[in-house]
Image (cartoon, grey):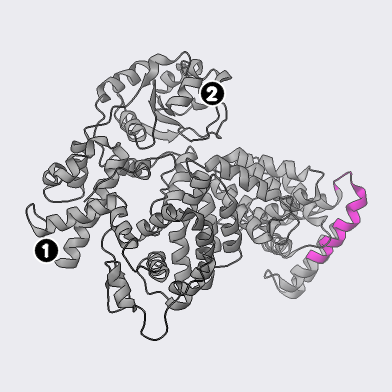
Amino acid sequence: MKLQATDAAGRRGGYSSVHADTNHGTMIGQWFEAVRRHSGAALPPEWVARELADYSPIENEEEAALLLKANQVIVLVADNLGSGRWTAALRLLTTAPGELRTLRRVRRETGEAFSMEGLQGKKRTGWILDLRETEEGLPASCDFGLELHQVGDLRDDDSYLAVLVGTELWERIGHGAGELVLTPKPPDSGTLFTALLRSAGVTHPEAWAGDHRFRKLLPQLLPGQVWDWARILVQSDSEYRASTGRGTEPGTDGFEEVAKAAGNAVSGWMDVLATWHSRPGRTSYDRNYLLLAAVNDGAPIDNVHLQIDSLSQEFGEKDERSAPLAGQQGPGLIQLARQIEAVPRADGHLIFPGPGFAEAVVRYFWQDRPELTDPFTKWTAQLCLKLKHPQGTLLAQRMAPWILHHAQATRSTRLLRLVAKDWSENGNLAPHAHDLLVAAILDPEIGQRVRNATGTWAVGEDTPAPLLQTLARVFQSLTPAHPKQMLRRLGELANSQKDGVADAVGEAINALWSDDELGTQVHSTLNSWFDSDQETLQRTASSAFMHLALRRDLGGEPTLLAGPHGETPDWVVRGWRTALEAAEPGLLARRACIAWLDAAATQKSNTAPIITVLVRAVHETPTDHLRGQRFLNLVRLAEYWLLQGEALDAEARNVFRAELLRRT
């Protein structure tokens, strides 16, 4: 058995906590939590408790605590993700003297200047400023080190700040703040490994940590890598007990089997796979079968021979050894399964030899055949579209980390765009295109690159409408984390004249309106769109406004009808005016008008305010040349309400409509 410390294992505890090693349906929850953490919202205490559940103190924790207490600020500097800065910061801020504090991340755009003034006003807060992103671009001229000394507001608020940063960036921006710096000294790796196993319920954790196969290499690992090793051993132990019903006490066969499987898993199964691939007589058909079994994660491969033939063609293989032999000449599925040390179950599913084997096969393929990574990923993305639901969506879930890996390795977003485009055109896979792009934007290595790329896609003439609609939902999801940038991107996206894009942007604005912290920025953005000379921005503002106009309070009244001081705000009149200046009212405008006229006809307190808003929308403007168009569209909307409205009976609606038009 050969254990190896891999770089990929060291990413635990990273910038966004959206790991690109495994998925298994967890990515949606991971990116949701990541957006919340980026947004500046309070970190939920239960989430913080989970992050610290397996925490082992850094060796210089006492020194760090004294440094934080004395200065209100501490800068945790290290070279690698997985070095323990994140959990050390959480620990220091939750154990700082005084009352328990609410923990928050500082919300800022990547590369944006930082000011201590932005932290004032929130009492008893533990702030975390995360500068670990690979492409963080704070310039040396930003006086960041001097800014960290402006702690008066922090003291007044009884708050603290922890800064997480890499060595290279700190050397560029940290002038004048050297006394605030501390490099976390990781806890003893054996102690951490034992603690992680014990908290997971593994029996005899000291025996595992003391075994020569683990003890020799543990000191070489970062805390994040130790966490990965412990997770793998826990999974190996659990799978062995479940499949055999036997224990894994030291000295037993079970202990040896689990140690072997865990060792293969932490080394990426490389020795096992290299031996398998190099076995005499191994054919391309065999290798493609192993790859397909991994792609399907042990599930039965539908039309296995057709899939292998298709994959062979994608790889440019023409040799007869890459295709199945006729009749019973070649190996059958049971023989192929046993050749990869898998156990075929009665239902056709395969039980792989240990945890992470399927993902290891794909990783081995990337390293062994890098020139085939592109065609393989494109082919698999298309397979997601060809498979029936839910098989296609399950494969898409598993593919997301592979695509992120490709983007990380190539520093290119070309394949990411291709997959997102294809998936956006499929109703079942469009949500996975959204999740993939959100995870990519939050990735610590390529996040800034993907943000730049999606901004280019949003204004590109060659970007199809379904992908633009997906981007609207992506920008909406990320607005809490990057409010200025994402609202600007929604504005850029609004310039598109392609079908459905304006509605998608409108729906995004409507969803963001409910966020108390973002509502003001959304309001300001809408006003700027209403005032724009660009018709597409005005149309998007109108679509967004119509979504907001449909909102009602518990009493059934339109929520936009009464402003903070009881009167209808001018911007609401402007929203209706813009909607009435369209060539012809759309379905959304009809629905909004029905909601408002129903409210006006059934509640006398609403009658005058609603009619006044609509009359002002038609007449109260210097652009008199559009007054006729606005009046014509109001007549059309009133006719539609007469036929489709639910308030009163038809005769009463006709009377009310006549009064509305007389007033107008």
Work out whether mark 2 precedes mark 1 in sequence or the reverse, and give the earlier one.
Answer: 2
Q: Residue furthest right?
A: 625
Q: Amino acid at mark 1?
A: Arg
Q: Is residue 344 left or right of residue 573?
A: left
Q: Quadrant of residue 105?
A: top left
**Where 158 falls versus 298 (above or below)?**
above
Q: Is residue 139 left or right of residue 597?
A: left
Q: Tell me, for residue 126, which label it has, or none.
A: none
x, y (%) of residue 99? 32, 28
Q: Is residue 54 left or right of residue 394?
A: left
The magenta region covers 620-637
Q: Residue furthest left?
A: 251
Q: Tell me, for residue 115, which label it has, or none.
A: 2
Q: Quick check: can you spot residue 396?
A: yes
Q: Tell me, for residue 246, which label it has, or none.
A: 1
How many other residues sit within 10 Å of disc 1, few (<14), some (14-19) or many (≥20)? few
How many other residues sit within 10 Å of disc 2, few (<14), some (14-19) or many (≥20)? few
